[in-house]
């Protein structure tokens, strides 16, 4: 029996309350309140050490170049990635975090 995967869109505030992002200990730039891990080698290695599993990793992506809004998607992605996040609570279903008010 195959498990179904659900995809939901939530707001940044809901994501922060539900999954609790952790601060990047290497962050020298307070972008995204110190939560984002850059795509540079030393930061991705630190991210891997901090994340308990792949389900604690999220990716900041530019899904629509014609929009001013960015999305955070569950999992480590490589296409259109701008950075990563690690959360205390792992994701179980595919989730998109959007700050676009027309989606949430």
Image: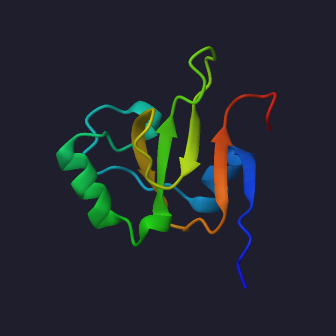
The C terminus lies in which quarter of the figure?
top right
Going 39% across and 51% down the picture, which residue do you hit? 23
Residue 68 seen by the camera: yes
Q: Is residue 100 left or right of residue 37?
A: right
Q: Position of residue 49 (x, y in %)?
A: 27, 65
The N terminus lies in which quarter of the figure?
bottom right
The residue lying furthest to the left in this view is 42
Q: Quadrant of residue 83?
A: top left
Count of labels shown?
0
Going 66% across and 53% down the picture, which residue do you hit? 95
Q: Is residue 92 left or right of residue 103?
A: left
Q: Quadrant of residue 28?
A: top left
- Nearest the viewer among 8 and 22 is 8
Q: Quadrant of residue 81?
A: top left
Going 74% across and 61% down the picture, which residue do you hit? 6
Q: Position of residue 60 (x, y in %)?
A: 49, 39
Q: Is residue 62 left or right of residue 92?
A: left
Residue 35 seen by the camera: no
The residue lying furthest to the top in this view is 66
Q: Is residue 90 above or below residue 36?
A: below
The residue lying furthest to the bottom in this view is 1
Q: Is residue 50 above or below residue 79?
A: below
Q: Position of residue 12 (x, y in %)?
A: 65, 42
- Nearest the viewer among 1 and 34 is 1
Q: Is residue 26 above or below residue 93?
A: above
Q: Is residue 12 above or below residue 21?
A: above
Q: Position of residue 47 (x, y in %)?
A: 31, 56
- Nearest the viewer among 8 and 23 is 8
């Amino acid at each position: 029996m195959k498990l179904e995967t659900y995809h939901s869109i939530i707001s940044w505030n809901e994501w922060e309350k539900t999954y609790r992002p952790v601060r990047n200990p290497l962050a020298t730039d307070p972008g995204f309140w110190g939560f984002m891990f850059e795509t540079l080698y030393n930061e991705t290695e630190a991210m891997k050490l901090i994340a308990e599993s792949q389900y604690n990793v999220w990716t900041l992506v530019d899904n629509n170049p014609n929009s001013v809004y960015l999305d955070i998607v569950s999992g480590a992605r490589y296409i259109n990635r701008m950075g990563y996040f690690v959360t205390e609570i792992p994701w179980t279903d595919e989730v998109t975090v959007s700050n676009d008010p027309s989606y949430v």
